[in-house]
Image (cartoon, helix red, strand yellow):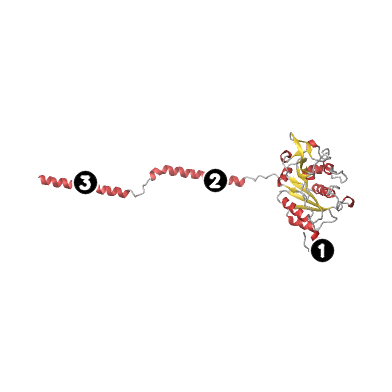
Amino acid sequence: MATRMKLKLKTVFVLYFMVSLMGLIYALMQLGQRCDCTEHNMPKDRTISRLRGELHRFQEQLRKSEATKQPQKQPAKPTIFVITPTYARLVQKAELTRLSQTFLNVPQLHWIVVEDSPHKTPLVTDLLVKSGLTHTHLHMPTAKDRKLQEGDPSWLKPRGVEQRNEGLRWLREDRRAQPGGDNQQGVVYFADDDNTYSLQIFEEMRSTERVSVWPVGLVGGMKYERPVVEGGKVVRFHTGWRPSRPFPMDMAGFAVSLKLILANQEACFDGDAPMGFLESSLLQGLVTMDELEPKADNCSKVLVWHTRTEKPKMKREEALQAQGLGSDRAVEV
């Protein structure tokens, strides 16, 4: 009886052990299997799907809106008409090349080049064609009695008078023939071919209403000349020579609105004006000191310089020419 009970308990124990072992093996096998969590993820998937749909609809609406939107036109910048007198000399091409490459960086600029010559020269014609600039090529010779002679100081007679006036004449005739007539926006600036210009000065002058002014460096025997500004108005001029002149400024120190030029048909430079009064001869008929518009941070910054190229010394060239060995004249300098 006791032996039979032991066998039963042993059998029960073995069966229990086998069942437990099989359960453990099954559990271990399930550890590496993917869980079917579909039921738990369904609400989350529906939310993601809905958000994607809304994003897609929003993107479609945005594309349609961009397609139908009219591009906003930027107001055109006023054109700057630059009048440059020039004359034949060894450094002429070098000066005009340097100046043209400055102007290439100025948007909406029209260069009016006026030669002191009875005709247009091939050198200037070719340079302007190759410059890539919007330009007008004119010529107007200076009367013999107004020309500087060899050895004369540069201040003895005003230079470029006839050429600047010819530029003004052409500008008035050309603009009158354009739509808008005398009401066209624009700025007129007189830029000599030997000066040095910061690009900033052109953006400063572009908003000129009547006559805008600024300092000029290295002029009049001084580091700079400039209008003196108090309370936003020009009250006097910092200059070392005859500050009592109506407008004691350098030609490079002001710009005039195109409207003002067109409205004053007779305004021009007076070739008979006393020394130092050439600028005043034009400005006196256009503006008063109180109406001047100070630029360049209330005339506190120098953005243009009255530089002059040194006249090249040709002693060796002349000596070689005397021997018939001079430089080839066909090479344009």
Q: Amino acid at mark 1?
A: Gln
Q: Which residue is mark 1?
A: 321
Secondary structure beneath disc 1? helix
Q: Earlier in the sequence, mark 3 or mark 2?
A: 3
Q: Earlier in the sequence, mark 3 or mark 1?
A: 3
Task: Judge the density around disc 1: few (<14), some (14-19), many (≥20) Cα neighbours within 10 Å.
Answer: few
Quadrant in which the N terminus is drawn: top left
- In front: 135, or 85? 85
In the rendered view, does 230 fall on the left or right side of 4? right
Which percent across, then down, holds residue 128?
76, 55
The single residue placed furthest to the bottom in the displayed view is 324
Q: Amino acid at mark 3?
A: Tyr
Q: Earlier in the sequence, mark 2 or mark 1?
A: 2
Q: Nearer the viewer, mark 3 or mark 1?
A: 1
The span from disc 3 to disc 1 (Cα, nearest Å) is 127 Å
Q: Assess whether mark 1 and mark 2 are in contact (beta carbons under 8 angstroms).
A: no
Which percent across, then down, holds residue 209?
76, 40
- In front: 8, or 192? 192
Task: Judge the density around disc 3: few (<14), some (14-19), many (≥20) Cα neighbours within 10 Å.
Answer: few
Q: Which residue is mark 2?
A: 59
Task: Judge the density around disc 2: few (<14), some (14-19), many (≥20) Cα neighbours within 10 Å.
Answer: few
Q: Amino acid at mark 2?
A: Gln
Secondary structure beneath disc 3? helix
Q: Residue at x 32, y 48 (%)?
A: 30
Secondary structure beneath disc 2? helix
Q: Which residue is mark 3?
A: 16
Q: Residue at x 46, y 44 (%)?
A: 48
In the rendered view, does 199 fall on the left or right side of 46? right
